[in-house]
Amino acid sequence: MKLLKNRNLWISAAAGLAFAAVIYPYHHDMYVSVTFTYVCAVMNLFSAVLFSILLYLKLEGKFPWDSLGSVVMSLLVQIPGHMLFSSINWGSWVCLGLIAAYLLYCWVIWRKAHPLTKEQKKRRCIAILVLMLLGSCLWGYYSSPVLRVRVFLMQYQDMLEERIQAANGDINEVEGVFLSDPMPVLCGIQKYDVWPGDHDMMEFHLFASGFGSQTSYYGCYYSFDDVPLPYCYATTGLVQEDENFWTWVGEGDNHGATRKLSDHWYYFEAHF
């Protein structure tokens, strides 16, 4: 322990480097541009440096309690960026978790120095209940891919249809319309594909979960003939489960489903 105590700077630096290496942004070239990858890497590196500095100050017994507000602000300013890139960078989720842990630690220390009155405790209980309610709503939203896709279409369906119709129903012209327009990136579409065939389809990838070969993809597609189609226009046949819901099974454990949301618009999920 004495050896470690005299190596606080090295311990903090090693912890920062290890943290930066572990949270190096996971990305797939098909979904994330090189620019976004670099931005994620810089953000993660900034968080790693800050965390290592705070660790060093704590080990040295010089944690700046007198300027706790500055520490809290340095943590808070990272949250918007990590939340923005959390859908394409799993390292941002790690950073957000550590930021939350640091903020909780700071709050506990501050609360010990400023105990609550009886009235303040009552208000805190009410605030906690409200936050729990909001948290449950957010959890319900993010744990339901269909709901997330429905919300997306509520916001952008008209805009997407305008661009699809600008191609005059020609599937070969649709991609050119979208390539000349930054709107898909601005509204959070990670990838879009045009699939010509007996029934033309334009597919929009919105989010994914998992890593490598154990990945699930979610999104929606516009069916020009308003018929359900399998993921990526695969040759796998669809099995109708009810009036507006179909499933498909591929090789191995590959499987997925599609659901009609509105005229021409369908939800899809694909698990590999």
Image (cartoon, helix red, strand yellow):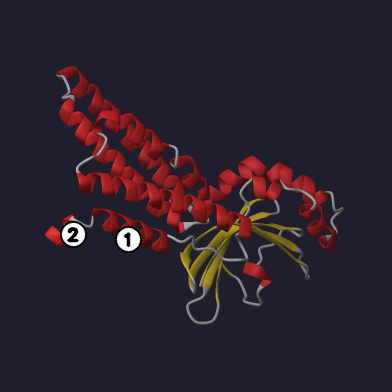
- How crowded pointer 2 is (Cα within 10 Å; few <14, some 14-19, many 20+) is rated as few
Q: Is residue 46 left or right of residue 167?
A: left
The spot of residue 183 in percent (x, y) is 71, 46
The spot of residue 238 in percent (x, y) is 60, 71
In this picture, is 232 found above or below 57?
A: below
Tell me if I can see residue 189 in this picture.
Answer: yes
The spot of residue 30 in percent (x, y) is 63, 65
Q: Indicate which disc, 1 or 2, sits on the residue closer to the N terminus.
A: 2
Q: Residue furthest front?
A: 6
In this picture, is 233 found above or below 58?
A: below
- How crowded pointer 1 is (Cα within 10 Å; few <14, some 14-19, many 20+) is rated as few
Q: Is residue 159 left or right of residue 254?
A: right
In this picture, is 254 found above or below 74?
A: below
Q: Nearest the camera: 262 or 35?
A: 35
- Residue at position x 79%, y 59% in the image: 175
Q: Nearest the camera: 271 or 81?
A: 81
Rounded to the nearest angstrom, the CA distance separating label 1 from label 2 is 12 Å
Q: Amino acid at mark 2?
A: Leu
Q: Secondary structure at mark 2?
A: helix
Q: Which residue is mark 2?
A: 4
Q: Amino acid at mark 1?
A: Ala
Q: Nearest the camera: 100 or 158?
A: 100
Q: Is residue 254 left or right of residue 130?
A: right
> Which quadrant holds residue 200?
bottom right
Q: Which residue is mark 1?
A: 14
- Residue at position x 77%, y 53% in the image: 178
Q: How many marks?
A: 2
